[in-house]
Image: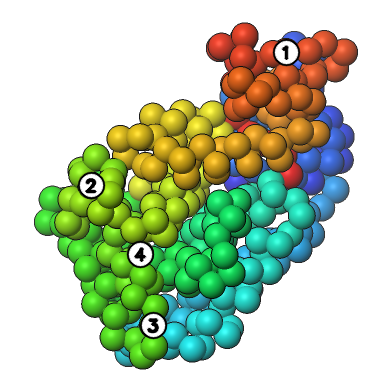
């Protein structure tokens, strides 16, 4: 079944009970494949048109990630950050991706299935830049944010690949070393000629939490730089929506629940609220997969509960703000 990832279905897939599992012309994701497996649909039962051509956003993310992989390899080897090159070669990719008109195509394109360290840097750069735009940062501050977010994990280039790629739970000693990437990144970036001082701060502070339970300095709310707060939200969201060596990507409703659970005590509530409001606004007209296996279309955002919209399923309507057990698992770009 894994070989079906990225292929486009030629026909609707219907369960034995007559339930539409996946509609025709859908590009298969891991979520679709798991749903098909749950209903005992084999790959032999499926007809698909082809592998989907990459979207514009996917092509840009792939190019940026390839560049980031080469860049981080050189940083690992030379222990120096080529700041001017990153500004002129990598950051334009980040900016171009955020200008794409289809928000969910962008969100889908930055999800990581492999090579997490490099693609995560691009993904967080894109998400933080989007957030900065939604927060109406001025041009100069947005440029600092884009660069700092893209380089937020550069300190991991001083940590062994064996630890970073370990599929099992890290030992206490290994986890302590991973947490030092914030300090390593700060030290590496502050040595870069002409760097804005807030960029090393992002590397240092993006794991700090408003309650003081973060690392490496256990800073509390007023002590954390505003740009670091933005990157913290982008970092958490991207990590939860991506497949990592030790953890599968979470479904949409779990990601939202976890973000809301962390609002106020872990993540900045204003930043999270702006982020989720803009995601909700982009949902209208999108096809969604619900956790009961049904497909629907978002037709209205509830202003009092904007993450639980009104969904049309065939000729009926489901108000997710009232149907508390029905949740959105996946949004189709």
In whole angstroms, how far apart are the C-alphas of marks 4 and 1? 42 Å
Ranked by sequence position, the earlier of labels 2 and 1 is 2
Disc 1: CA contacts within 10 A as few (<14), some (14-19) or many (>=20): some
Q: In the picture, residue 309 is in which quadrant? A: top right
Q: Nearer the viewer, residue 283 or 328?
A: 283
Ranked by sequence position, the earlier of labels 4 and 1 is 4
Under tag 2, what secondary structure? loop
User: How far across and how far down the image is residue 293, in percent?
Assistant: 66, 20
Q: In the picture, residue 194 is in which quadrant? A: bottom left
Under tag 1, what secondary structure? strand
User: How far across and how far down the image is residue 78, in percent?
Assistant: 32, 90
Q: Which residue is mark 1?
A: 318
Ranked by sequence position, the earlier of labels 2 and 4 is 4
Q: Residue at x 62, y 26 (%)?
A: 306
Q: Which mark is residue 202?
A: 4
Q: Nearer the viewer, mark 2 or mark 4?
A: 2
Q: Residue at x 73, y 19 (%)?
A: 310
Q: Residue at x 29, y 59 (%)?
A: 205
Q: Which mark is residue 1?
A: none
Q: Which residue is mark 2?
A: 220
The answer to whether mark 2 and mark 4 are in CB contact below 8 A is: no
Under tag 3, what secondary structure? loop
In whole angstroms, how far apart are the C-alphas of marks 3 and 1? 51 Å
**Could you tell me which quadrant the N terminus lies in?**
top right
In the rendered view, would you say 332 is above or below 15? below
User: How far across and how far down the image is residue 327, in percent?
Assistant: 59, 21
Q: Residue furthest left?
A: 173
In whole angstroms, how far apart are the C-alphas of marks 2 and 4? 15 Å
Q: Which mark is residue 195?
A: 3
């Amino acid at each position: 079944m894994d070989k079906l990832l990225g292929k486009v279905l030629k026909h609707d897939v219907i369960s034995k009970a007559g339930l539409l599992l996946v509609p025709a012309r859908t590009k298969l994701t891991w979520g679709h494949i798991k749903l098909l497996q749950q209903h005992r649909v084999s790959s032999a039962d499926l007809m698909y048109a082809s592998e989907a051509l990459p979207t514009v956003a996917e092509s840009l993310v792939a190019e940026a990630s390839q560049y980031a992989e080469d860049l981080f390899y050189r940083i690992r080897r030379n222990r120096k950050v080529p700041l001017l090159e990153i500004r002129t070669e990598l950051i334009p990719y980040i900016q171009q991706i955020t200008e794409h008109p289809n928000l969910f195509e962008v969100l889908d394109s930055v999800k990581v299935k492999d090579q997490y360290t490099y693609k995560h840097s691009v993904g967080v750069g894109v998400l933080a830049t989007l957030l900065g735009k939604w927060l109406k940062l001025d041009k100069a501050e947005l440029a600092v944010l884009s660069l700092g977010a893209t380089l937020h994990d550069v300190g991991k280039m001083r940590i062994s690949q064996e630890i970073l790629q370990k599929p099992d739970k890290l030992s206490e000693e290994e986890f302590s070393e991973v947490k030092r990437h914030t300090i390593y990144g700060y030290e590496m970036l502050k040595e870069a000629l002409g760097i804005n001082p807030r960029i090393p701060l992002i590397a240092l502070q993006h794991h700090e939490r408003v309650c003081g339970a973060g690392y490496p300095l256990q800073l509390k709310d007023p002590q954390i730089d505003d740009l670091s707060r933005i990157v913290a939200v982008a970092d958490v969201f991207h990590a939860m929506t991506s497949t990592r060596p030790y953890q599968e990507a979470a479904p949409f409703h779990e990601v939202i629940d976890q973000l809301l659970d962390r609002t106020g005590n872990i993540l900045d509530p204003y930043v999270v609220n702006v982020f989720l409001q803009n995601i909700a606004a982009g949902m209208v007209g999108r096809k969604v997969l619900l956790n009961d296996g049904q497909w629907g279309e978002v037709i209205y955002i509830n202003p009092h509960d904007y993450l639980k919209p009104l969904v049309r399923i065939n000729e009926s309507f489901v108000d997710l703000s009232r149907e508390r057990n029905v949740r959105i698992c996946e949004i189709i770009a």
